[in-house]
Amino acid sequence: MVKREIRESLLKKLKISKQALSQRANRLKEKHGPMTTDEAVYIIAHMEGIDLSKHLPLAVLDRIRALVPKEVGQSAQAQRVAKKKETTRKQKSKQDTYPLVTNAFIQKARNMGDDAFPRVFILENSIRSLIRFRLSPVDKDWWLNLIPKPVIDSVDRTIKKEKKFPYREKRGSEPLMYCNFDDLRKIIADNNNWPHFQDVIIKLDWFEVKMEEVYMARNSLAHSVPLSKDDFSSINLFYNQWARLLESAGIK
């Protein structure tokens, strides 16, 4: 007999009658049996995201999970994820209003915040890490001895400006964290430094073009300008390509 707590939770979630639940269980049995009616109900509950572990012994729970038809389980999971995303989107859409800005514009901002910004953030810091990883073994004072002077001067100006606002937390504990995206390109493309990166990046011209494309898109993000489809594509493409370069070089 089906556990009362599970049946009640399932009926409440599906908003159906006991008879309708029995009919659904019978259809599941006919299509994916053999299984008992109780097991069919438990499978439906499992696919609806109800936690069976609170009510069923481990052995029974393992059997239910094993009985879940693969294609049905995947479909139910996809539907739950899609439903959750849609609900979240609608809730945010209702909550978000701002003077002189349309809801469509706010949605663009959310799309950039959910997709483009995290990728640029991760990409930029991955490039920083590669610079540190490759140059620090070459020279103990690699920042002073290997970094192009224009980059050092730019970073020094930024650090000096930061000191005027002591109430703010420091951007980082090392000068490399004060480099902007284009500074990172200049460090790697420097004639003296390029040999230390050539085995990873392979083609300098390609790297500089990609960095320039993402740098322009990054500036749009920084200045609150909506990204074009081309900007999104440039970020996503280089984000994926950079990861493959590092993986191919055995860098994780």
Image (cartoon, grey):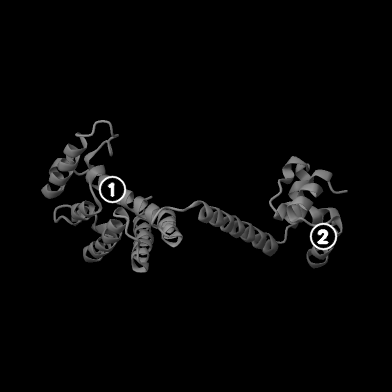
Which residue occupies 27% across, 57% down? 219
Tell me, for residue 128, which label it has, or none: 1
SS for tag 2? helix
Residue 61 position within the rendered picture, expressed as x and y whole percent measured from the top left: 75, 47
193 on left or right of 232:
left
Q: Residue furthest top?
A: 167
Q: Nearer the viewer, mark 1 or mark 2?
A: 2
Residue 189 position within the rendered picture, expressed as x and y whole percent measured from the top left: 19, 57
246 on left or right of 6:
left
Residue type at the position of mark 1: Arg
107 on left or right of 73:
left
Marks 1/2 in contact by CB < 8 Å: the verdict is no
**Depth check: 204 or 162 in front?**
162
Is residue 196 visible in the rendered structure shown here? yes
Query: Of label 1 and label 2, which has the lower sequence position?
Result: 2
Residue 81 position within the rendered picture, expressed as x and y whole percent measured from the top left: 60, 57
Q: How far apart are marks 1 and 2 (CA)?
A: 56 Å
Mark 2, residue position: 25
Is residue 251 visible in the rendered structure shown here? no
- Quadrant assignment, res 182: bottom left
Residue 224 position within the rendered picture, expressed as x and y whole percent measured from the top left: 32, 55
Q: Count numbered badges in the picture.
A: 2
- Quadrant assignment, res 78: bottom right
In this rendering, is residue 182 above or below 230? above
